[in-house]
Amino acid sequence: MNVWITTVGSSPFAVINTLWAACELDDFVPEKVYFLCNDKMASQINLIKEWIIRITHEYGKNVSFVEKRSKEEDFISYSKLVKSLITDEREQGNVIAIDITPGRKIMSAFSMFYGLLPDGADRVYYLHLFDVKKYGNKSFIDIPADEHNLINMKEMVA
């Protein structure tokens, strides 16, 4: 099973577009999505779910969702959460992708760290937008192909 782990930040399209890009550009279509968020950002999740259901359905998959809450300033708990999700999903034999695009830098740093470990994620994605102000709140289909780059950090550092 393909598993997606992402942090929910203030921009829904930072979450949606990286997943969409992975489906379109890397043939990685998740069947299970973990949302890591704090209480402030939880209000974004319903909109994000609607988009992800539509996207994954177009690629022939049904998706399930798991929400995990953490306090923004409790870095130790967040770190342990990311590590445990990877470990648990790895033990089940699943293929794991972590999206480090959305959320706070410290959260992305923990996700990238654990994702890049030899027993970490299979893919660690970052969607680089060449003009964040222009395209940050647009859907992936509305961003010209020469204005973004989907980076798999796992391939980059391997």
Image: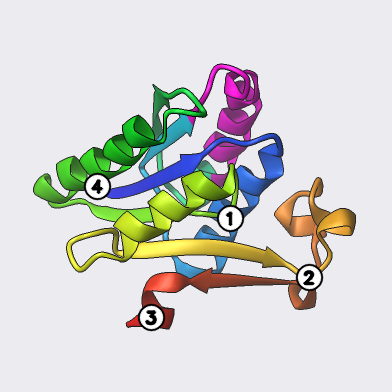
Residue 79 percent across, percent down from the top left: 33, 41
Quarter occupied by the C terminus: bottom left
Check disc 3 and report the residue beneath it. 157
Q: Residue at x 46, y 54 (%)?
A: 109
Tell me the residue that label 4 is attached to.
86
Instruction: Please provide the residue range marked out in magenta.
Output: 37-55
- Nearer-N-terminus badge (1/4): 1
Mark 2 or mark 4, earlier in chain: 4
Eyeballing the image, is 86 above or below 28?
above
Neighbours of disc 2 within 10 Å: few (<14), some (14-19), many (20+): few
Which residue is depicted at the point 37% across and 35% down? Answer: 78
Q: Which residue is mark 1?
A: 18
Instruction: Give neighbour class at mark 4: few <14, some 14-19, many 20+ (Cα, 10 Å).
Output: many
Foreground mark, 1 or 4, reads 4
Residue at 89% x, 57% y is 134
Residue at 44% of width from left, 72% of height from top? 153
Residue located beneath label 2 in the image:
130
- Amino acid beneath label 1: Thr
Q: Nearer the viewer, mark 1 or mark 2?
A: 2
Q: Relative to residue 153, is residue 150 drawn left or right?
A: right
